[in-house]
Image (tube, rainbow, N blue to C red):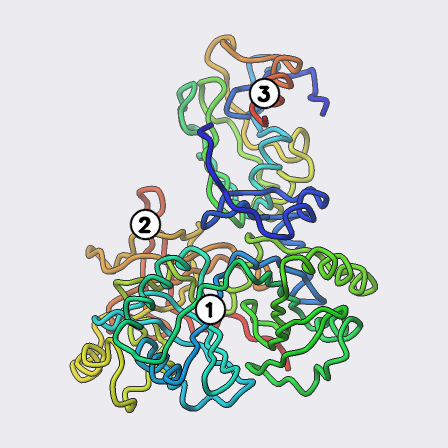
């Protein structure tokens, strides 16, 4: 599966796209497939500081709950309000309308994978 | 990953072909979902779904004193069964708690067919063998490897199964069964299920199972039949408020506490756990399994604490977003004084207390 090349990826299957100091975060296609039907997304209120690698939120599927980890640290600017009524957007469009939060990124991203490296990582993990 | 020796059901190849996600469950490699839990759940509520439940255990009790034995180890009254009838029951510890919950089918006066949970099959069989030592004229056989079990569930189940069997399905009433054939192969056809919908559970020889599975999928195509994994099996049984062993009931809980007093027949002369249950009924139960609806935002899950004010009062046994009802619901044990519908509770979710309220169960009842 082809990952968008305009963003970076974590080993815990989040993506982050940084533009002008603003980081948009979501989960990957692989992550949403593993989770199954998403029914509830819990993310922090704007203003909250999150540390890189810290828990950024929780995604509830019908089966279980999973944590989302912050690919970069920073202050939460906004949560995707669309997900309140339509959590299935995370399944349907994980790289677009299913984004989770925007952060004011504290510093440059470190230790993340580009699309090619992430694809390789997923291919290895799923075997 | 460590090498494990997971068992596979006779339908394993069918699941791989269907690109199911397979997970370890009760020692088996089982399909947890095919296309998605919510779609599969919906198919069963609105039309029909097909389940591989071959992991379930089958135990036969055979002999002159078969009824006496079944009466001794279970809490429901098997003497009420006639051949071709089944009942839901509990396999009891001497403390009146569940070794397992099970279906008891009466084949004939000297033959009973017990269907138990996959995760408990070995434990149940050993327990029954030990108990059978006190009975002359009873043999207990673990027949689990001799049967594949396929469940056809949903409002269209009868129309699908009818295409593959000469049995008169409309005459098989709820909780009855016949010895018949499906696609020409010998089959026990029971009108039972674990979804809250109409449907059948069919027990066939493992060699016949893949062919029958594929033919059932073909027969159901016009109704949009879907294979259904363990994920939707759980949400379906949960909405119908059917207990899951290991979650809602176990060897620390009694049928009286679990709201299953209708399977406890204390008028039976004696059975394992009877004295404990008589005492518990006389003293009154202290806690009860209830259903609750989340009032705040969040989803209760198994093992989350239940609070009332500043006191931790109980524990969540099952909880999810109920697909048909479209809201987060849960089940759990609470003190009897908090068990009435309308009682306010808090569920502890990731160190936060989220409001919930006790509601009537079952959450979902199929329209008739």
Q: What label does residue B348 carry, if any?
A: 2
Element class at badge 3: helix
Q: In this view of the protein, which residue sits in the foreground, B260 or A39?
A: B260
Side (left or right) of B273 relative to B255: left
Q: Position of residue B80 (x, y in %)?
A: 43, 91
Q: Quadrant of the C terminus of chain B?
A: bottom right
Chain of the residue where label 2 is placed in the rendered structure: B
Q: Position of residue B133 (x, y in %)?
A: 28, 71
Element class at badge 2: strand
Identify the residue at horizontal 50%, vertical 16% (top origin): A105
Give the residue pinned by disc 3.
A124
Chain of the residue where label 1 is placed in the rendered structure: B
Chain of the residue where label 3 is placed in the rendered structure: A
Identify the residue at horizontal 37%, vertical 77% (top origin): B138
Q: Nearer the viewer, mark 1 or mark 2?
A: 1
- The lab-note entry on whether marks 3 and 1 share a chain reads no
Give the residue pinned by disc 1.
B241
When the figure is inspected, residue A16 is found, relative to residue B49, above or below; the finding is: above
Give the CA distance from mark 1 to mark 2: 22 Å
Side (left or right) of B327 relative to B14: left
Q: Nearer the viewer, mark 3 or mark 1?
A: 3
When the figure is inspected, residue B352 is found, relative to residue A25, above or below; the finding is: below
N-terminal label among 1 and 2: 1
Q: Position of residue A68 (x, y in %)?
A: 48, 31
> Could you tell me if the residues under marks 3 and 2 are in contact, i.e. CB atoms within 8 Å?
no
When the figure is inspected, residue B7 is found, relative to residue B146, above or below; the finding is: above
């Amino acid at each position: 599966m082809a990952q968008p090349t305009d963003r970076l990826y974590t080993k815990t299957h989040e993506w982050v796209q940084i533009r002008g100091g603003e980081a948009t975060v979501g989960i990957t296609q692989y992550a949403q497939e593993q989770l199954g039907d998403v029914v509830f997304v819990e993310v922090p209120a704007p203003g909250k500081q999150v540390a890189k690698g810290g828990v950024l939120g929780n995604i509830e599927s019908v089966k279980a709950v999973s944590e989302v980890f912050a690919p970069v640290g920073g202050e939460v600017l906004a949560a995707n309000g669309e997900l309140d009524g339509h959590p299935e957007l995370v399944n349907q469009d994980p790289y677009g309308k299913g984004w989770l939060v925007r952060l004011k990124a504290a510093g440059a991203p470190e230790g993340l994978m580009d699309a090619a490296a992430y694809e390789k990582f997923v291919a290895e993990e799923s075997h | 990953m460590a090498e494990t020796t997971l068992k596979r059901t006779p339908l394993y190849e069918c699941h791989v072909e269907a690109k199911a996600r397979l997970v370890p469950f009760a020692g088996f490699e089982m399909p947890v979902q095919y296309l998605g839990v919510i779609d599969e759940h919906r198919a069963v509520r609105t039309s029909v779904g097909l389940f591989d439940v071959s992991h379930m255990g089958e135990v036969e009790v055979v002999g002159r004193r078969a009824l006496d034995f079944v009466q001794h180890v279970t809490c429901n009254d098997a003497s009420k069964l006639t051949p071709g009838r089944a009942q839901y029951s509990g396999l009891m510890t001497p403390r009146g708690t569940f070794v397992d919950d099970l279906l008891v089918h009466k084949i004939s006066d000297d033959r009973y067919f017990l269907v138990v949970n996959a995760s408990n099959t070995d434990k149940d069989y050993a327990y029954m063998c030990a108990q059978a030592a006190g009975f002359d004229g009873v043999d207990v056989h673990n027949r689990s490897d001799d049967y594949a079990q396929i469940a056809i569930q949903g409002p269209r189940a009868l129309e699908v199964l009818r295409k593959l069997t000469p049995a008169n399905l409309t005459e098989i009433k709820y909780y009855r069964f016949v010895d018949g054939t499906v696609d020409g192969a010998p089959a026990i056809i029971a009108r039972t299920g674990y979804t809250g919908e109409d449907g059948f559970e069919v027990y066939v020889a493992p060699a016949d199972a893949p062919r029958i599975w594929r033919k059932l999928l073909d027969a159901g195509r016009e109704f949009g039949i879907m294979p259904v994994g363990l994920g939707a099996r759980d949400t379906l049984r949960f909405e119908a408020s059917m207990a899951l062993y290991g979650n809602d009931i176990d060897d620390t809980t009694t049928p009286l506490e679990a709201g299953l007093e209708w399977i406890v027949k204390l008028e039976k002369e004696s059975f394992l756990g009877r004295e404990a249950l008589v005492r518990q009924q006389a003293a009154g139960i202290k806690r009860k399994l209830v259903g609750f609806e989340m009032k705040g935002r969040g989803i209760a899950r198994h093992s989350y604490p239940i609070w009332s004010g500043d006191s931790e009062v109980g524990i969540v046994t099952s909880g999810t977003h109920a697909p048909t009802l479209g809201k987060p619901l849960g089940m759990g044990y609470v003190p009897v004084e908090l068990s009435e519908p309308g009682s306010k509770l808090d569920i502890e979710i990731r160190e936060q207390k989220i409001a919930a309220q006790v509601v009537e169960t079952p959450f979902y009842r199929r329209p008739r």
